[in-house]
Image (cartoon, grey):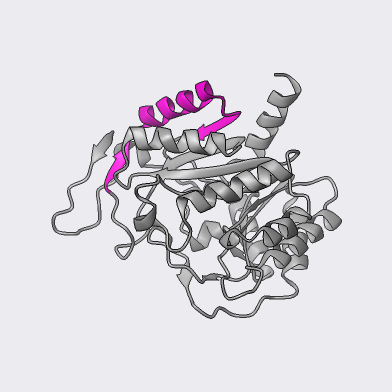
């Protein structure tokens, strides 16, 4: 399916040639980073070591990581810190995020979160407060929330959806057969249930999910995942390349060639998925505002 990896001595894996990026300096990137640091906020860009973070910062874009920087789950692909008992929630976090978004002049705000299984509602109320604060400070903005599965707690899902986000995003991350190796507590069927619940009860909201390639999945299993996400009601499916963030994380098996991502894009579109966003550098929140704009344009002019 791509560029095979041979890692017999467990050394750092060689980078596929199509994944090399040229990075140039930008005052916009420094300004974005400065605003985030000034308010003591966390971004998934930094915590998860996203390869697109410099490009996004240059465009005055950042995906805010809410509810702290330590996660109560230890998924094998994710570099975010693990802690069974994270620090208490910051009551000023909603206002800090809203103010930062205002200073960055964002038109579309993406809020993701660490899993907070230590909290009775999984952090749902805090996400609701953040979205409400964003709208209050930035009335014309669109919002996207990328949440945990809240252990499929429907009351928690109703809580976050009552804030009226433009997009609800919950990533299924990988194929059904690889889920036990890749994720900690979330299950494949559980994620599908979360996505279906939101789509069935809030059909005016776009539903989004995504997977990573490179764990050793087959093309057929990826296609089955696309089918399952489509059947669950996903309007947007993102597919990107897994990049092993450290030697402690699950091993990268393969760099998937760009043409495979193109093939999967066409497959999803032929199936009926309204928007397929695929490619080696695609991440769930990458160019999220542009994706929403294109989807809205398609809706207006089918």
User: Among all residues in the image, which is located at the extreme left?
Assistant: 8
* Residue found at x 25% / y 52%: 13
- Would you say 262 lies left or right of 40 here? left
Which region of the structure is painted magenta?
253-277
Q: Is residue 259 magenta?
A: yes
Looking at the picture, how far across and down is residue 42, in whole percent?
A: 60, 66
Looking at the picture, how far across and down is residue 299, in whole percent?
A: 72, 26
- Would you say 31 lies left or right of 50 here? right
Please name whichever residue, 288 or 73, is drawn nearer the observer in this view of the structure. Answer: 73
* Residue found at x 55% / y 44%: 209
Please name whichever residue, 46 or 186, is drawn nearer the observer in this view of the structure. Answer: 186
* Residue found at x 31% / y 65%: 248
Does 287 appear above or below 53? above
Whether residue 287 appears in this view of the structure is yes
Q: Is residue 240 magenta?
A: no
Q: Quadrant of the N terminus?
A: top left
- Would you say 208 lies left or right of 125 here? left
Whether residue 22 appears in this view of the structure is no
* Residue found at x 59% / y 36%: 236
């Amino acid at each position: 399916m791509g560029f095979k990896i041979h890692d017999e001595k467990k050394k750092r894996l060689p980078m596929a040639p199509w994944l090399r990026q040229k990075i140039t300096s930008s005052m916009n990137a420094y300004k974005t980073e400065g605003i985030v640091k000034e308010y003591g906020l966390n971004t998934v860009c930094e915590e998860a070591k996203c390869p697109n973070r410099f490009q996004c910062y240059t465009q005055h874009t950042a995906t805010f990581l809410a509810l702290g920087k330590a996660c109560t789950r230890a998924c094998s692909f994710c570099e975010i810190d693990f802690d069974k008992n994270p620090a208490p929630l910051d009551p000023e976090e909603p206002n800090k995020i809203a103010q930062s978004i205002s200073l960055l002049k964002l038109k579309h705000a993406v809020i993701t979160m660490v899993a907070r299984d230590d909290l009775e509602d999984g952090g749902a109320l805090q996400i609701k407060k953040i979205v409400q604060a964003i709208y209050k400070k930035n009335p014309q903005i669109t919002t996207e929330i990328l949440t945990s599965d809240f252990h499929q707690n429907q009351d928690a899902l109703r809580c976050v959806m009552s804030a009226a986000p433009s997009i609800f995003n919950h990533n299924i991350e990988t194929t059904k057969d690889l889920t036990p190796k890749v994720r900690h507590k979330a299950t494949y069927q559980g994620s599908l249930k979360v996505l279906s619940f939101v789509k069935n009860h809030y059909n005016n909201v776009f539903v989004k999910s995504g997977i990573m390639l490179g764990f050793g999945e087959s093309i057929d299993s990826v296609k089955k995942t696309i089918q399952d996400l489509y059947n669950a009601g996903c309007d947007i499916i993102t597919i990107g390349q897994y990049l092993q963030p450290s030697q402690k994380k699950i091993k990268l098996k393969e760099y998937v060639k760009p043409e495979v991502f193109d093939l999967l894009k066409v497959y999803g579109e032929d199936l009926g998925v309204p928007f397929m966003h695929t490619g080696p550098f695609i991440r769930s929140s990458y160019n999220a505002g542009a994706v929403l704009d294109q989807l809205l344009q398609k809706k207006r002019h089918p």
